[in-house]
């Protein structure tokens, strides 16, 4: 990429200046910050008076953006030579600067120079940026449509995009604009300002447009500042004045903070004659930062909540109880632990879960929704038995379980299941030291309520059991006898389960408590059984 940049840059001999941007090939696929700055001082058209500081503005801002201590941009391109700032040259530079941008990149386009406007009954007011070969009397044919520039920036692949224009279009003396005689005469016949331009594309997500002045105001240059007024204070906001411009004290200056600083300073300096304006809509992992080091920017990245399921269209996203957006719009959330709630258009809760969001993470809403696919679980664990008659049974035991879950059968909170269990235990009867082998086979069903906030379920269960035991004893004559017993019974109880996704499967931990009636000899009795098992589940 570095070699390509060098070769292409040679096409603008003397016109394209690149700073000391980092060019390590290992960084190619990481998010990059790219800036293209264009400053036009000199014009071929004698009707366009030369500007003093437009080219210097571009160079000065480019130097600050390229400086590791301030902007820390990865690639900064500055075009100021008269031969390179033609209409063709600017369009070529824009294509080149944006050709390899990727989704997570940041792109800044800065334009400084003369502007003008055209006015007619059909198209209304149109704003133009004049390149070095632009003709004031032929703005439509030779100028660059500002609405077209807005569209070009909006269509860039980079997620974060900024257009900055230090120009104006009112034609007042001492400003960065001129009007053709035809347009000036039409404006003289108007009562008040020309009608506002129309048809400009609205700002999209993670996009900002900064303008040095309202379209009907002058954008002024100041000899004592050696810059355009707005650009001077914009540079100040991300360099020497960054600490004051950083209103939230996070060590970063975002595009809104930079503009607010430059706007207030510009209005004060010009006595209100020049009022910079901005349009932006920042929805993304991070604000668009113009100053601050990479480590601080990475730590400030926000997480995203997004959805692709068409069934979730128009669903509302609440974060910690506060409305934050409507799907399928992407919702940016500060890193940390939050309660994320999804409600449908009727206000019914579809999902609600406490989750920890990392900086830069994208959380898909589908992952918050309860998975209603049938699933099979295989578990193994230990049992503990106690109660009347338990002294005839060993207290330590093992169990295997196969469970079929059917969360698709009913409302979101309802989860029935069918399960089969095989358990067994062995040991000596405490009183007589008689070795006993015993166990049970059971079939049953459970009806659980599933939490919408946590991956747990709780509910009752009913099982039919066939219990068996085998032991050796002595009859009345003293002969050793092998005894085997089989008893049918039922068990009433309840179970709770915790399920944690692991890739395409999930881990499950289950605790159950069952009351089991049993006949011991001629005596009817019962015991209580605690079971703790862990296993793996897979959706069908």
Image (spheres, rainbow, N blue to C red):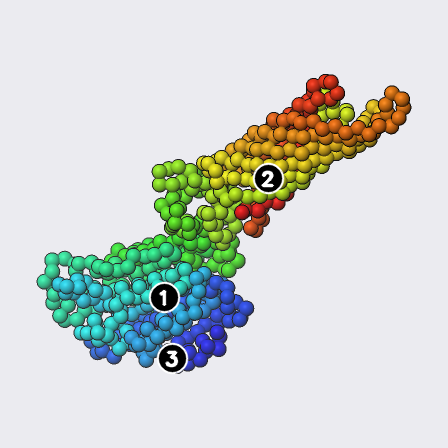
Q: Real-space Cα distance between discs 1 and 3?
A: 18 Å
Q: Nearer the viewer, mark 1 or mark 2?
A: 2
Of residues 171 and 132, the one nearer the viewer is 132
Of residues 338 and 264, the one nearer the viewer is 338
- Disc 3, SS: helix
Do the residues bearing badges 1 and 3 touch, measured as CB atoms within 8 Å? no
Q: Real-space Cα distance between discs 3 and 2?
A: 71 Å
Q: Real-space Cα distance between discs 1 and 2?
A: 60 Å
Do the residues bearing badges 3 and 2 touch, measured as CB atoms within 8 Å? no
For disc 2, the neighbor class at 10 Å (few under 14, some 14 to 19, many from 20) is many
Residue at 79% in and 28% down: 483
Residue named by callout 1: 109
Residue named by callout 3: 12
Judge left or right: residue 342 versus residue 498. Answer: left
The circle drawn on residue 403 is 2
Relative vertical location of residue 221 with respect to residue 303 in this rendering, above or below: below
Q: Position of residue 65 (x, y in %)?
A: 43, 65
Residue at 62% in and 32% down: 512
Do the residues bearing badges 1 and 2 touch, measured as CB atoms within 8 Å? no
Label whose residue precedes the other's in the sequence (1 or 3): 3
């Amino acid at each position: 990429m570095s070699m390509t940049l060098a070769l292409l840059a040679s096409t603008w001999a003397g016109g394209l200046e690149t700073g000391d941007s980092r060019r390590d090939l290992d960084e190619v696929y990481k998010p990059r910050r790219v800036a293209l700055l264009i400053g036009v001082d000199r014009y071929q058209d004698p009707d366009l008076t030369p500007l003093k500081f437009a080219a210097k503005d571009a160079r000065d801002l480019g130097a600050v953006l390229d400086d590791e201590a301030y902007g820390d941009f990865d690639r900064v391109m500055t075009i100021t030579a008269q031969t390179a700032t033609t209409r063709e040259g600017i369009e070529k530079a824009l294509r080149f600067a944006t050709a390899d941008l990727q989704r997570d990149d940041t792109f800044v386009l800065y334009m400084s120079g003369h502007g003008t406007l055209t006015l007619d009954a059909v198209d209304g007011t149109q704003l133009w940026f004049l390149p070095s070969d632009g003709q004031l009397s032929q703005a439509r044919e030779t100028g660059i449509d500002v609405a077209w520039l807005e569209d070009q920036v909006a269509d860039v692949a980079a997620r974060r995009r900024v257009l900055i224009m230090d120009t104006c279009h009112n034609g007042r003396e001492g400003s960065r604009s001129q009007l053709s005689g035809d347009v000036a005469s039409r404006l003289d016949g108007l009562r008040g300002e020309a009608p506002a331009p129309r048809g400009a594309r609205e700002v999209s997500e993670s996009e900002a447009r900064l303008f040095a002045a309202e379209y009907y105001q002058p954008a002024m240059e100041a000899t004592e500042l050696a810059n355009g007024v707005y650009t001077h204070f914009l540079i100040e906001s991300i360099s020497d004045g960054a600490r004051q411009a950083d209103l939230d004290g996070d060590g970063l200056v975002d595009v809104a903070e930079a503009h607010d600083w430059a706007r207030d300073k510009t209005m004060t300096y010009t006595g209100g004659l020049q009022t910079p304006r901005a349009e932006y809509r920042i929805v993304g992992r991070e604000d668009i930062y113009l100053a601050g080091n990479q480590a601080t920017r990475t730590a400030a990245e926000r997480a995203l909540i997004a959805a692709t399921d068409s069934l979730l269209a128009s669903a509302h996203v609440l974060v910690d109880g506060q409305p934050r957006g409507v799907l399928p719009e992407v919702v940016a959330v500060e890193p940390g632990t939050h309660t994320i709630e999804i409600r449908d258009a009727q206000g019914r809760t579809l999902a609600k879960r406490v989750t920890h969001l990392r900086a830069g993470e994208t959380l898909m809403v589908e992952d918050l929704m309860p998975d209603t696919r049938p699933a099979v679980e295989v578990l193994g664990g230990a049992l503990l038995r106690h109660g009347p008659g338990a002294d005839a049974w060993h207290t330590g035991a093992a169990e295997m379980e196969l469970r079929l879950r059917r969360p698709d059968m009913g409302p979101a909170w309802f989860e029935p299941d069918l399960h089969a269990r095989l358990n067994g235990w062995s040991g000596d009867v405490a009183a007589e030291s008689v070795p006993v082998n015993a166990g049970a086979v059971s079939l049953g069903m459970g009806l659980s309520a599933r939490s919408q906030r946590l991956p747990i379920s709780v509910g009752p269960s009913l099982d039919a059991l066939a219990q068996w035991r085998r032991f050796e004893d002595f009859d009345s004559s003293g002969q050793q006898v092998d005894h085997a017993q089989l008893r049918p019974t039922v068990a009433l109880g309840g179970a709770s389960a915790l399920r944690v996704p692991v890739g395409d499967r999930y881990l499950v931990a289950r605790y159950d408590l069952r009351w089991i009636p049993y006949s011991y000899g001629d005596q009817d009795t019962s015991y209580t059984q605690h079971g703790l098992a862990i296993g793996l589940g897979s959706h069908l």
